Image (cartoon, rainbow, N blue to C red):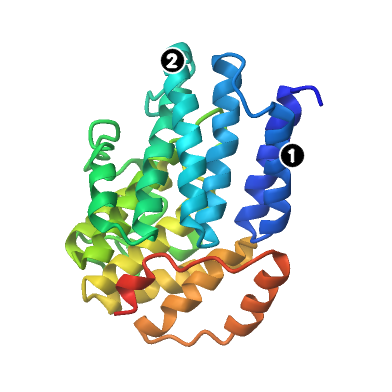
Amino acid sequence: MRADPITIDRLWLAAIGSAARGHYASARRDLALAERIAGGRARDAAHGVRLARVFVAAASIARQLGDHRAGARYDGRAAVLVAAARSGTEGSGTPAGIGVAEALWIDAIAGAAADALGDGGIARAAGIARRLDALTPAPARDRTEAANDVWDTAAGAPPADGWEVTASALCASEVPARGPSGRELVRAGWVRAEIAMTAGDGGAAVAAATGALDRASIGGSCRHRIKSALVLAAARVVAGEPDGARPLVEAVRAAADDHGHLPLLWAAGMLAPAVGLDAPEGPAVTAELGRRGGLPTVLGARSFAR
């Protein structure tokens, strides 16, 4: 099969969309086909970046299904390819000024930290995550107008900084995709938050999760905003703030249901009892995810289930 870049990109994009809606079997088939078409080896820097993107996506799906060792293998393969390509792809960048290869490098490192955490190695995960510090600057303290569309001072019982998430705004607008979107910076925040949750450091978890939601609100997709709100809800539970987490869980469940993000709806349902909410849709969602190719693991379950 000829290594057609357009076909590889289409398969990768289809897999991303399928996985977001819980169609894991379909997503894995598309990524496996993309890898076969790509040939498994980088011919040049551009081809290496394209293949690394496939591996990063495959790692993410493996982690969602609880196979952290497979995730680590894919992230390692991606990191090797990106390390070879970084110097050759610094031209086209993200809105944050990060080049395509640099963005994938952050993705692979964040993924490796998540792989280590999922395999029970919190110290190893924290060590890997520290490598992100020089690559992922903290978001600006002053929220932009775009971020203010998601955060609202008048909504619900505000957290300590005077802001709360507006449920209806999580997916109210989309930022058109033009290459890398800053997703890797959002994901780095998720990983930092989950490491802090697993360590029982609620304050650090809330700070990292808030930063991730700020970033997602500026340039992230609907799914990134929903998941960032879910991560923040879990962090608030760990921090002993279930009342502050409850409106977030409600917002996540509504948005995930409206937009077909079944894995996030399932995860929010798993968190619901910790904030005093029922999740009557749980059995049906669980059964449907099983039909689609498997159940995701719960983000931070070791932390907020304690």
Any mark on residue 33, and which?
1
Image quadrant in which the C terminus is located = bottom left
**Mark 1 burial class by Cα count in 10 Å: few <14, some 14-19, many 20+:** some
**Mark 2 burial class by Cα count in 10 Å: few <14, some 14-19, many 20+:** some
Q: Is residue 6 left or right of residue 49?
A: right
Nearer the observer, 9 or 178: 9
Image coordinates for residue 200, horizontal then vertical, percent: 21, 68
| Snapshot quadrant of residue 127 | top left
Work out whether 279 lies above or below 245.
below
Work out whether 29 lies above or below 193.
above
Q: Residue at x 74, y 23 (%)?
A: 3
Per the image, the residue denoted by label 2 is 90
Image coordinates for residue 226, horizontal then vertical, percent: 48, 58
Image coordinates for residue 172, horizontal then vertical, percent: 54, 53
Q: Residue at x 35, y 68 (%)?
A: 233
Asked whether the residues under the numbered discs 2 and 1 touch, taking CB atoms below 8 Å apart as contact, a structural biologist would say no
Amino acid type assigned to the residue bearing label 2 in the image? Glu
Q: Residue at x 41, y 54 (%)?
A: 150
Amino acid type assigned to the residue bearing label 1 in the image? Leu
SS at badge 1:
helix
Nearer the observer, 123 or 106: 123
Work out whether 33 lies above or below 95.
below
Real-space CA distance between mark 2 and mark 1, rounded to the nearest whole angstrom: 28 Å
Image quadrant in which the N terminus is located = top right
Q: Is residue 102 visible?
A: yes
SS at badge 2:
loop
Q: Is residue 170 visible?
A: no
